């Protein structure tokens, strides 16, 4: 099914401004015939033209394009304070379209996926859902959930992990979730330029999206994914232990020390531990801890861990072949194997790699060259 411009929204916007189609075409620097084809659904603007159309008419992306059954569903794991713009949405959906031809080069899909039928952020059912997943993975109520457990779940559910190096600050997102509904495949881009104590939470957050595909791309889905990630990484039994220790402390400093010990043990942020402990106390009707979020963030920001990329690629800067090997070996992902096969089969060039991974062109060229020199297994 091809994409179609929402002609009624555009005509309404033109009427509001008193413009004709010809005047719109002049504003866009396009021919009136091309604009007419857009409105008839016989042609579709490129991402750059779509953004210009949105800016000219001051219409959001979702009001410009008629949703289609095969449209990629996207969800961002944004950095703090970052705002998702129409440009981000258009680029991410464009990446989704570029991923579609890659699917046929992936291994055959599994018959069964894990689904959470009634996702909710209510404490008791949320904890039950987390306990169900932990039991499936084969770990106990207070055991540390390892990266390997999460990676294995992505693999079992045909979610393809795509480790990327997007930088610590220059990109608005730390993870990008792209669900191709028609193909029934999910791609999850994970930014390795992320602090260690946050990375596991983001992986758990993305796994929640995999378990609840009907909520993908919605605010409800984001809220559930955040809540589920906390419950999965630090469930009620862990929160009860941490609360018991922290509540016996005689000072805020003592509470913080107790919370930090548990955070270190589970390789997660102290903020995640704090949120789960306070949620447990509230659910049980117990007195909340004295430490407040502002104090907690001050302490947390003063004790930031290393970047995942720095840990994985010590002592040298990562090379393209290192990222390719890491993707297959550590993240159990067939992404680059499939991409290398596609490049060989279709003759796609460096720009395809660059756009597919949302990286600078020089990095796309380097990866393309590394893939061309790699041997497909």
Image (spheres, rainbow, N blue to C red):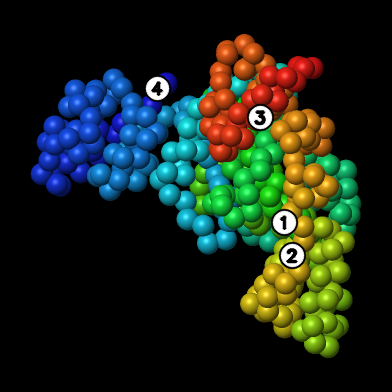
The alpha-carbon separation of the residues under discs 3 and 4 comes to 30 Å
User: Which of the two labelled residues, at mark 2 and mark 1, occupies the earlier sequence position?
Assistant: 1
The alpha-carbon separation of the residues under discs 3 and 2 comes to 30 Å
User: Which of the two labelled residues, at mark 1 and mark 3, occupies the earlier sequence position?
Assistant: 1
Please name the residue that numbered disc 2 is placed on. Answer: 304
Front disc: 1 or 4: 1
Give the number of marks. Answer: 4
The residue positioned 10% from the left and 44% from the top of the image is 18
Image x and y of residue 194, in percent: 69, 53
The residue positioned 81% from the left and 50% from the top of the image is 311
Labelled disc at residue 195? 1
Labelled disc at residue 2? 4
Say which of 369 and 258 sits in front.
369
Mark 3 in CB contact with mark 2 (< 8 angstroms): no
Q: Is residue 42 left or right of residue 199?
A: left
Mark 1 in CB contact with mark 4 (< 8 angstroms): no
Front disc: 3 or 4: 3
Label 1 Cα neighbours within 10 Å, binned few <14 / some 14-19 / many ≥20: many
User: Which of the two labelled residues, at mark 1 and mark 4, occupies the earlier sequence position?
Assistant: 4
Mark 2 in CB contact with mark 1 (< 8 angstroms): yes
The residue positioned 47% from the left and 44% from the top of the image is 88
Label 2 Cα neighbours within 10 Å, binned few <14 / some 14-19 / many ≥20: few
Image x and y of residue 275, in percent: 70, 67
User: Which of the two labelled residues, at mark 3 and mark 4, occupies the earlier sequence position?
Assistant: 4
User: Vertical placement of 68 versus 223: above or below?
Assistant: above
Please name the residue that numbered disc 3 is placed on. Answer: 367
Whether residue 319 is visible: yes
């Amino acid at each position: 099914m091809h994409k179609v411009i929402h002609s009624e929204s555009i005509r309404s916007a033109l009427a509001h401004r008193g413009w004709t189609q010809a005047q719109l075409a002049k504003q866009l620097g396009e021919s009136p015939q091309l604009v007419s084809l857009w409105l008839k659904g016989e042609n579709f603007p490129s991402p750059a033209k779509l953004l210009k159309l949105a800016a000219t008419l001051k219409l959001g992306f979702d009001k410009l394009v008629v949703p289609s059954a095969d449209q990629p569903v996207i969800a961002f794991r944004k950095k703090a304070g970052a705002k998702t713009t129409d440009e981000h949405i258009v680029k991410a959906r464009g990446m989704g379209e570029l991923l579609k031809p890659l699917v046929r080069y992936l291994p055959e899909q599994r018959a069964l996926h894990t689904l959470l039928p009634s996702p909710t952020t209510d404490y008791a059912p949320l904890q039950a859902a987390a306990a169900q997943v932990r039991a499936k993975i084969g770990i106990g109520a207070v055991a540390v959930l390892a990266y390997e457990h999460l990676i294995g779940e992505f693999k079992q559910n045909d979610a393809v992990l795509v480790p990327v190096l997007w930088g610590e600050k220059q990109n608005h997102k730390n993870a990008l979730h792209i669900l191709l509904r028609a193909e029934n495949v999910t791609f999850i881009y994970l930014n390795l330029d992320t602090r260690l104590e946050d990375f596991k939470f983001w992986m758990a957050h993305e796994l929640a999206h995999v378990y609840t595909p009907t909520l993908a791309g919605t605010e409800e889905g984001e809220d559930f994914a955040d809540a589920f990630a906390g419950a999965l990484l630090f469930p009620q039994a862990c929160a009860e232990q941490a609360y018991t220790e922290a509540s016996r402390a005689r000072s805020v400093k003592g509470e913080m020390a107790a919370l930090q010990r548990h955070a270190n043990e589970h390789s997660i942020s102290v903020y995640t531990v704090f949120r789960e402990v306070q949620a447990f106390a509230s659910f049980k009707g117990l007195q909340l801890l004295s430490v407040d979020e502002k104090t907690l963030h001050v302490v947390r920001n003063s004790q930031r861990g290393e970047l995942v990329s720095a840990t994985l690629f010590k002592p040298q800067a990562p090379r393209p072949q290192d990222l390719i090997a890491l993707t297959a070996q550590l993240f159990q992902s067939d992404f680059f194997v499939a991409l290398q096969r596609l490049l060989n089969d279709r003759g796609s060039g460096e720009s395809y790699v660059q756009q597919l991974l949302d990286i600078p062109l020089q990095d796309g060229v380097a990866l393309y060259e590394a893939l061309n020199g790699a041997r497909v297994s």
